[in-house]
Amino acid sequence: MAFSPNQPVTRDQAKVMNRFDITKRMVALLRQEEAVIGGIGYTNFDLWAAERRPQNFYMLGSMGLAVPIALGVALAQPQRKVIALEGDGSLLMQLGCLGTVAARAQKNLAIVIMDNGAYQITGGQKTVTDQCVDLVAVAKASGLAQSAWAADESAFEELISLSLKEDGPWLIGCRIDNAKPADTTERDPPKLKDQFMRGLGVRK
Amino acid sequence: MVTETPGDTETWDEITRRVLKRHKVDLVTYVPDNVLRPLIEGIHADPFFTAFAVTREEEGMGILSGAWMAGRRGILLMQTSGFATLPNVLASLPMAFHIPTLMMVSERGTLGEFNIGQTLVGRTMRPVLDSLAVEHYTMTRLDEAEFILDRSIVQAMATQSPVCFILSPLLTGGKKFEK
């Protein structure tokens, strides 16, 4: 498998990075109007802060559905690469979706997990990833063979580039710190949806 | 080749498939149910549809919402108890964002139910739909099935609002109590 030389690493070995920094690094690598689905809370706040691309969708509620929404976009537009950005707490709510993605063998889908081991937006209570659950291992056991922890920022960029170039599905685990997000997403769902649909060429 | 003309002997599931095809609803996610079996099997046998089981009903609703925003129409099939897992997602995704997700629920809990859990949870379905102001129709008669499906799908798409079709045992025969 075409993983980078400094892979694989375990969750414990992965460098703790900053969510806003790696979100910016990811967005900078997007050249083909790739769709990005930002999971609830700080995950999409930092996506909003990184760049207000019309191909970004920002969730408001429906915790845990970044991956299913991204899978829906990927099924509707198989020529477009789609990235789901999801937090550890959110993914833990909907682990079955990993098996669904694997069963579909969805080539144009990549999942990026922002794992700080905490429900940060509600006060930093620990999630079970802080204690025992390795989400990359869960993904592999769910059938997502192309799953890896990003060892550091350069490995993260390498994995994102690979996922944009080669067939998926991909899952990239990122350990992140507890820094506050850089901004707050505008809470206007119909407007966010309309912009996203125009960004995907569904509306003119 | 499947014919597109309605026959006198058309069943509720055949009518449903025909109307879904007419409206280009070709993505089907489901958590299965015995009553839905002929519909699910007919959909899987028809290459027009992309159909697969999801692990939870809310996962299916997320997939349909993403697909619709990206230009593809779909429907979520489930039973009453599965619908009961949906209120948070219904409120915060299709209702908040104005996304016309189509739902079809096989009604359990009434007209000969044998499982007390189904009876109790079944009573929450219409109050939940009403309190969220989700359009819903209970389908009881074969001769009304096409009209309800056809008009409601048109309305859902035109008004960007979800709609829920409830399949009554009066239409489907329901699930029989067999000891």
Image (tube, rainbow, N blue to C red):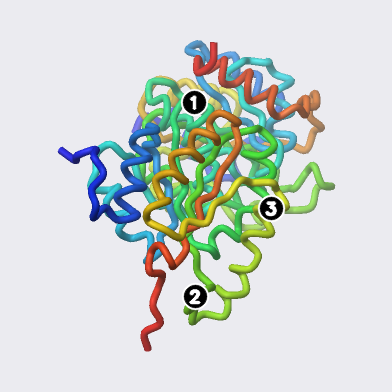
Closer to us: A23 or B179 = B179
Q: Is mark 2 on a helix, strand or loop?
A: loop
Q: Position of residue B137 (x, y in %)?
A: 54, 52
Residue drawn at x 44%, y 57% as measured from the top left: B31
Question: Is residue B73 shown to the viewer in this render?
Answer: yes
Q: Which amino acid does label 1 sit on?
A: Ala
Q: Which amino acid does label 2 sit on?
A: Leu
Q: What element carries label 1?
A: loop
Compute the Cα span from label 1 to label 3: 28 Å
Q: Name the residue under label 3.
A: B130
State which chain disc 3 sits on.
Answer: B
**First of labels 2, 1 by sequence position:** 1
Marks 2/1 in contact by CB < 8 Å: the verdict is no
Q: Tell me the quadrant of the picture where the N terminus of chain B can be found.
A: top left
**Label 1 Cα neighbours within 10 Å, binned few <14 / some 14-19 / many ≥20:** many
**First of labels 1, 3 by sequence position:** 1
Q: Name the residue under label 2.
A: B111
* Residue B70: mark in rendering: 1
Q: Is mark 3 on a helix, strand or loop?
A: helix
Asked which quadrant contains residue B155, the reply is top right
Q: What residue type is labelled 3?
A: Asp
